[in-house]
Image: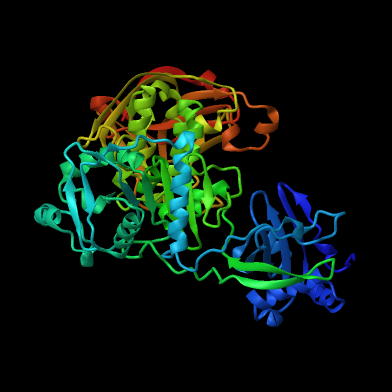
């Protein structure tokens, strides 16, 4: 029988998603007329939104079916809020399923929501459950059969591991001296706990004898419990396996960290924990116990439907940004990216990630086009070397670091693997084989610009805080030509890690250079950031993106002459007039329809904004202070070829 109120939950398609829905008042009326579908929706409200009758205005019930996912009922305060995924106004998300091998007779002539009901895999109410552990075991067994996930049966153990003995208190630090074996690794946030129990010179001997579990924070304890449960004899945890007050040991082990995660049989990711004391295992308040609801079918029979409230659906278009606090941290980027397989502990369920699969704990593949960081890394391995590096730099650069000077060390494992696979030569986050393109990066201008500048060579994206955009990514689908020649690139690392922190570096480059004036007179942009302007009579459309706040500087340029220019600054913005130089790096010819969008990524000229160093009179070097783009190539005709040294 067709129902005018709910439309029999007929599904309509839109961009790969099938959906249906109505305001709750129509479901109330439909139930009064005997509609089984409307009755089911009211039963869902009664079971999972008990105070729904006191909500002001209409509630909207959305029935959705995504590819490879279970049928979902979303209860929200309005259709517009639901359609824009504003989770603050979504009251409940409920998954529906039926018992295995059961079928419900529905209207045969329409694409009906209940015709898509499959077996519901109910989630445990805590991640410390037998069901959660069993999910991990099944994933590991399945992964072992994946052709793309195969690893050697044993791999070199890290320099030190935590040995897990037969009893819960039998834990000790062990030096491996070249031994092979299978081990797990932990990826977690340290947090701000100053009392975190860690290995230092003073307790090194004691840690090799025994690690007192009572002194370990909850996340480390839970990870050790899980590793035991899964049958591992060893686990690698950075705070315990690196001598934390030995700079030389830290640099040596940090350089090997990428290999440690790459060789681990499993990486345990405390994705929703904000600190080492937060724990790995948690109760799941957004998950309900499964409930049995009754649906009256077209044959008049009553059929049991299993329902369970869940958290927000995970969208893989940005999965690494939804996994919790861990996905915001800089060090954990390479820990995830380089791992063979990861089990993510989120607030709502476990997420399994390997090269082949991306599964949620309810055993369904996660919806979307994105493959997770591991799958994304494999996919980009098959593409252009420089594109994939730049792609990962854009993701990584947005992440946070407790020590900003770890910007290069925290990605050094990826850099080392990249160099090993390609043979390219590394230089402070860029690659010498493609310097003319890699030098062209742009500050995302997010956050406090007065806190943006860091140490190291100014031509490297690692010399500023915050996210960056790279020309290798935004120009990959457009024709462009390099305008400069990079003759030499030299870097001096701070310590023993050749891929780690850089003390200084120089780039010698020949290309078209144009002197210009720059000023800031107190005007702020629409984002409340200083609007620094480059001035030139022949080109009104010059787009300048500073690397940080800038300050006026007087430099000695020789022969007792001085020049007013500008450098990066950690001070609040101040009015200035300065002389700067534009070094043009790339020329592009985007289609006219792209030029009309007036976006920085569809310009004709791209270059660096440089200023003489304070010692210019002696060493003739420049520092980078920003990037520049123009909509035409007119300024090339006024530029002169010069060879510059940038530090």
Q: Is residue 606 above or below residue 361?
A: above
Name which residue lies at 56% across and 71% down: 288
Where residue 29 appears, as percent x and y from the top left, is: 84, 76
Q: Is residue 460 left or right of residue 102?
A: left
Where residue 299 appears, as percent x and y from the top left, is: 85, 67
Image quarter where the N terminus lies is bottom right
Question: Residue 610 versus residue 358: which sits nearer the camera?
Answer: 358
Q: Is residue 241 left or right of residue 366?
A: left
Name which residue lies at 35% across and 64% down: 279
Name which residue lies at 33% across and 32% down: 416
Name which residue lies at 61% across and 46% down: 368
Is residue 248 visible in the rendered image? The answer is yes
Is residue 518 visible in the rendered image? The answer is no
Question: Residue 408 versus residue 629: which sits nearer the camera?
Answer: 408
Number of callouts: 0
The answer to which quarter of the image holds residue 311 is bottom right
């Amino acid at each position: 029988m067709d129902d005018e109120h709910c439309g029999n939950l007929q599904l309509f398609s839109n961009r790969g998603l099938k959906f249906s829905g109505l305001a709750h008042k129509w479901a109330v009326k439909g139930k009064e007329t005997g509609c089984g579908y409307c009755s089911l929706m009211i039963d869902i409200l009664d079971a999972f939104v008990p105070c729904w009758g006191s909500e002001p205005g209409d509630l909207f019930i959305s029935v959705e079916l995504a590819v490879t996912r279970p049928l979902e009922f979303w209860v929200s305060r309005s259709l517009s809020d639901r359609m824009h995924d504003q989770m603050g106004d979504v009251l409940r998300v409920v998954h529906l399923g039926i018992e295995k091998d059961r079928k419900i007779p529905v209207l045969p002539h329409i694409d009906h929501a209940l015709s898509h009901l499959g077996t519901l895999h109910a989630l445990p109410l805590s991640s410390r459950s037998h069901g959660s552990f069993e999910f991990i075991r099944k994933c590991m067994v399945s992964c072992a059969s994946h052709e793309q996930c195969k690893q050697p049966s044993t791999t070199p153990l890290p320099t030190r591991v935590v040995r897990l003995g037969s009893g819960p208190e039998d834990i000790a630090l062990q030096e491996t001296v070249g031994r092979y074996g299978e081990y797990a690794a932990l990826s977690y946030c340290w947090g701000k706990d100053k009392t975190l129990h860690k290995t230092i010179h003073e307790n090194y001997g004691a840690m090799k004898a025994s690690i007192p579990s009572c002194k370990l924070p909850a996340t480390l304890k839970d990870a050790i419990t899980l590793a035991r449960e899964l049958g591992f004899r060893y686990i690698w945890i950075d705070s315990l396996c690196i001598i934390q007050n030995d700079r030389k040991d830290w640099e040596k082990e940090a350089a090997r960290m990428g290999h440690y995660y790459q060789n681990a049989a499993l990486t345990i990711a405390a994705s929703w924990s904000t600190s080492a004391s937060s724990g790995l295992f948690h109760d799941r308040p957004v998950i309900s116990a499964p409930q049995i609801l009754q649906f009256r079918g077209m044959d008049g029979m009553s059929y049991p439907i299993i329902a369970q409230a869940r958290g927000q659906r995970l969208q893989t278009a940005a999965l690494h940004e939804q996994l919790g606090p861990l996905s915001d941290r800089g060090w954990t980027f390479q820990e995830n990216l380089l791992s063979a397989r990861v089990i993510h502990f989120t607030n709502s369920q476990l997420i399994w990630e390997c090269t082949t699969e991306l599964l949620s704990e309810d055993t369904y593949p996660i919806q979307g086009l994105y493959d997770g960081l591991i799958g994304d890394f494999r996919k980009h391995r098959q593409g252009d070397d420089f594109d994939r590096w730049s792609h990962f730099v854009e993701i990584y650069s947005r992440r946070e670091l407790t020590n900003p000077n770890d910007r290069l060390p925290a990605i050094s494992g990826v850099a080392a693997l990249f160099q090993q696979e390609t043979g390219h030569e590394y230089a402070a986050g860029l690659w010498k084989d493609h310097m003319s393109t890699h030098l062209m990066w742009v500050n995302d201008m997010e956050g406090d610009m007065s806190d943006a500048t860091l140490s190291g060579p100014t031509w490297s994206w690692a010399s500023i805080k915050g996210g960056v955009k790279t020309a290798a990514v935004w120009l990959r689908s457009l024709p462009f030509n390099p305008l400069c020649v990079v003759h030499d690139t030299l870097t001096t690392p701070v310590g023993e890690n050749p891929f780690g922190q850089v003390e200084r570096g120089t780039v010698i480059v020949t290309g078209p250079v144009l002197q210009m004036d720059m000023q800031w007179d107190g005007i702020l942009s629409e984002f409340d950031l200083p609007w620094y302007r480059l001035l030139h009579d022949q080109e009104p459309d010059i787009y300048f993106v500073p690397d940080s706040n800038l300050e006026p500087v007087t430099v000695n340029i020789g022969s007792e002459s001085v020049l007013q220019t500008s450098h990066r600054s950690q001070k609040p913005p101040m009015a200035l007039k300065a002389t700067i130089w534009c070094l043009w790096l790339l020329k592009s010819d985007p289609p006219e329809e792209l030029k009309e969008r007036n976006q920085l990524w569809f310009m004709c000229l791209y270059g660096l904004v440089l200023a003489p160093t304070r010692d210019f009179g002696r060493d003739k070097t420049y520092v980078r202070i920003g990037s520049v783009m123009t909509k035409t190539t007119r300024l090339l005709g006024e530029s002169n070829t010069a060879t510059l040294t940038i530090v």
